[in-house]
């Protein structure tokens, strides 16, 4: 059980003008689990753990905006989509992901996107 957030894509909570989208990534889940353990062990206060997560949200958004230069093309069969609370979620099946130098066939892809104009830094 995570102490800090309960997020699904249709009920995100903007915290200090960021989205919690990246907390569902592998690195975000590992960070959250580590912070949970530290709070349970008493080595970190819940308030400080929340501050770490908020900074993680900001840092991920900034790093992706300023440091990632790659372009990706994704094609597949649209299985489901939804738009809720200014967040788009697309589920693709039999997808092909292409970059400049490689192509990967994957069974399923979940794409979550929000309007970057809503993120003020």
Image (spheres, helix red, strand yellow):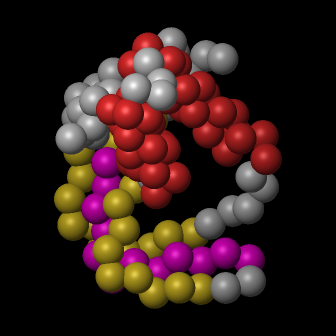
Q: Work out whether residue 23 or residue 30 is closer to the camera in this orientation and state it.
A: 30
Q: Which residues are magenta?
A: 89-100
Q: Quadrant of the C terminus?
A: top right
Q: Work out whether residue 48 or residue 69 is closer to the camera in this orientation and state it.
A: 48
Q: Quadrant of the N terminus?
A: top left
Q: Is residue 78 above or below residue 27?
A: below
Residue 18 location, x and y as percent?
Answer: 51, 23
Residue 30 location, x and y as percent?
Answer: 45, 51
Q: Work out whether residue 22 or residue 103 is closer to the camera in this orientation and state it.
A: 22
Residue 26 location, x and y as percent?
Answer: 46, 57
Residue displayed at 44% across by 18% down: 45
Q: Is residue 82 above or below residue 76?
A: above
Q: Is residue 98 above or below residue 53?
A: below
Dividing the picture into quadrants, the one containing residue 7 is top left
Residue displayed at 35% across by 60% down: 110
Q: Work out whether residue 41 or residue 6 is closer to the camera in this orientation and state it.
A: 41
Q: Is residue 64 above or below residue 48?
A: below
Residue 12 location, x and y as percent?
Answer: 31, 28
């Amino acid at each position: 059980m995570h102490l800090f957030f309960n997020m699904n894509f249709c009920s995100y909570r903007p915290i200090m003008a960021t989205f919690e989208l990246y907390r569902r990534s592998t690195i975000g889940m590992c960070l959250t689990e580590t912070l949970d353990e530290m709070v349970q062990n008493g080595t970190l206060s819940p308030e400080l753990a929340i501050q770490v997560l908020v900074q993680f949200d900001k840092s991920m958004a900034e790093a992706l905006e300023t440091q990632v230069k790659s372009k990706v093309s994704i094609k597949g069969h649209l299985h489901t989509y939804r738009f809720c609370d200014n967040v788009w979620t697309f589920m693709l099946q039999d997808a092909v992901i292409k970059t400049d130098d490689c192509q990967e066939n994957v069974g399923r892809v979940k794409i979550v996107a929000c309007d970057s104009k809503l993120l003020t830094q």
